[in-house]
């Protein structure tokens, strides 16, 4: 396996965070435009939750892509990222409908995105420490 990708732990972290990012994009695709969702646009909390999820999703996508670019081989990045993007709609379909289409799902997504960003920071710090010369 080392001849294919020597950095297996960063590859797993990349795949996990990219999975959350891909599912987040699918959830948010149903939340926008806000004008088509009176349950979200009708309340300031719903609008703030949707926009907060959008910002966190953008941070996670950019951060995960940078982490993968910094710590993985290009081929591993493409294969793992493509595989996750291919199977993310299946994971999205496993969610109950109230999570996919309601405020509860956006709140859960907010927590998952925040946790993934925090985990990515820890993983990046760990990977950088492992790569630093002793």
Image (spheres, helix red, strand yellow):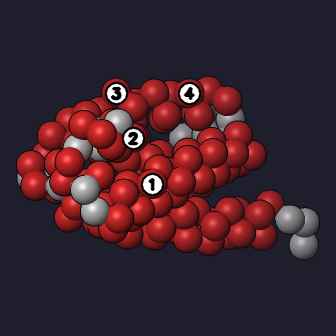
Q: Residue at x 86, y 65 (%)?
A: 132
Q: Residue at x 25, y 56 (%)?
A: 42
In terms of sequence position, does the residue under pointer 2 or pointer 1 come before the other? 2
Q: Decide if residue 133 is on the left or right side of residue 84.
A: right
Asked if labels 4 and 3 touch by Cβ distance under 8 angstroms, the answer is no
Q: Which residue is mark 4?
A: 78
Q: Residue at x 59, y 53 (%)?
A: 59
Q: Position of residue 128 (x, y in %)?
A: 77, 63
Viewer-closest of 108 and 10: 108
| Mark in front: 4 vs 1 | 1
Q: Which residue is mark 1?
A: 51
Mark pair 2, 1: CA separation: 12 Å
Work out whether residue 12 can be spotted. Answer: no
Q: Residues within 10 Å of mark 4 (few under 14, many from 20)?
A: some
In terms of sequence position, does the residue under pointer 4 or pointer 1 come before the other? 1
Q: Which residue is mark 3?
A: 86
Viewer-closest of 57 and 89: 57
In terms of sequence position, does the residue under pointer 3 or pointer 1 come before the other? 1
Mark pair 3, 1: CA separation: 26 Å
Name the element at disc 4.
helix
In terms of sequence position, does the residue under pointer 2 or pointer 4 come before the other? 2
Q: Which residue is mark 2?
A: 25
Mark pair 4, 1: CA separation: 29 Å
């Amino acid at each position: 396996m080392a001849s294919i990708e020597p950095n297996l732990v960063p590859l797993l972290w990349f795949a996990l965070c990219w999975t959350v990012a891909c599912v987040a994009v699918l959830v948010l695709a149903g939340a926008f435009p806000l004008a088509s969702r009176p349950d979200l646009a009708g309340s300031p909390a719903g609008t703030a939750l949707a926009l907060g999820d959008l910002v966190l999703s953008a941070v996670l996508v950019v951060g995960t892509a940078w982490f993968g670019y910094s710590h993985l081989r290009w081929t591993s990045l493409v294969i793992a990222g493509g595989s996750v993007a291919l199977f993310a709609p299946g994971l999205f379909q496993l969610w109950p409908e109230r999570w996919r289409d309601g405020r509860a799902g956006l709140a859960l997504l907010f927590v998952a995105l925040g946790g993934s960003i925090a985990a990515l920071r820890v993983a990046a710090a760990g990977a950088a420490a492992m790569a630093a010369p002793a």
